Image (tube, rainbow, N blue to C red):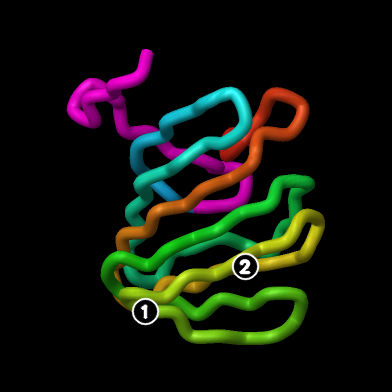
Amino acid sequence: MAIINLSDVRDEFVTPKHSTAFGKLITGEHIEIGILKYKAGEGAQEHSHPHEQIAICLSGRSRVTLDGEVFEVGPGQAVLIPPNVPHSTYVLEDSEMISAKSIVDGVGHRI
C-alpha cells in the first residue's frame, strides 16, 4: 500500500530487548521507519545490530554513546549508526525521534 495513515498504525514497544522506545513502525521491503517516544531517564542499553540506522531528534535531548564516544543530541540533529557498532542512549528530556533502519534478514527494528 502506498499511503499509510499513521492513525491506523498501532503504537508498540519497538525493541524491548534493548530499549524503552515506544511508537509506530512502518515497514517496507528494505527500510523501516519508527516514530518513537522516550521518557526522561529511559533509553537503550548498549547493543549492536547488523542494520545501518539513522535517528533524527525531533524534540528533547539524549546522550548517545557510539563506539565509546559520547555525544549530546537535540532537536534538528541526527545520529548515523553504522552496522555492528556498539551504541546506547540515555534520554535526558522526554524525546521524540524518527529512526530509520535497514532491513536485514527480513528484520528491522524488531530485533
Under mark 1, the amino acid is Gly
Under mark 2, the amino acid is Ser
For label 1, the crowd category at 10 Å Cα-Cα, with few meaning under 14, some 14 to 19 and many 20 or more, is some
* Front position in the image: 72 or 92: 72
Residue 3 part of the magenta-drawn span: yes
* Front position in the image: 13 or 1: 1
Is residue 45 in view from this perspective?
A: yes
* Horizontal relation, residue 74 to residue 19: left or right: left
The vertical placement of 49 against 56, above or below, is above
User: Please, what secondary structure does the residue beneath circle 2 have?
Assistant: strand
The vertical placement of 62 against 4, above or below, is below
* Horizontal relation, residue 20 to residue 60: left or right: right
Q: Position of residue 40 (x, y in %)?
A: 34, 70
Residue displayed at 31% across by 33% down? 11
Q: Position of residue 108 (x, y in %)?
A: 62, 35
Among all residues in the image, which is located at the extreme left? 7
Residue displayed at 56% across by 60% down? 44
Q: Position of residue 57 (x, y in %)?
A: 37, 67
Res 88 quadrant in image: bottom right
The vertical placement of 72 against 81, above or below, is below
* Residue linked to disc 1: 74
* Horizontal relation, residue 69 to residue 43: left or right: right
Residue displayed at 50% across by 73% down? 90
Residue displayed at 22% across by 25% down? 5
Q: Which residues are magenta?
A: 1-19
Q: Position of residue 22 (x, y in %)?
A: 38, 45
Q: Earlier in the sequence, mark 2 or mark 1?
A: 1
Q: For marks 2 and 1, give the one nearer the viewer.
A: 1
Residues under numbered marks 2 and 1 in contact, where contact means CB atoms less than 8 Å apart: no
* Number of marks in picture: 2
* Residue linked to disc 2: 88
Q: Main secondary structure of the magenta part?
A: loop
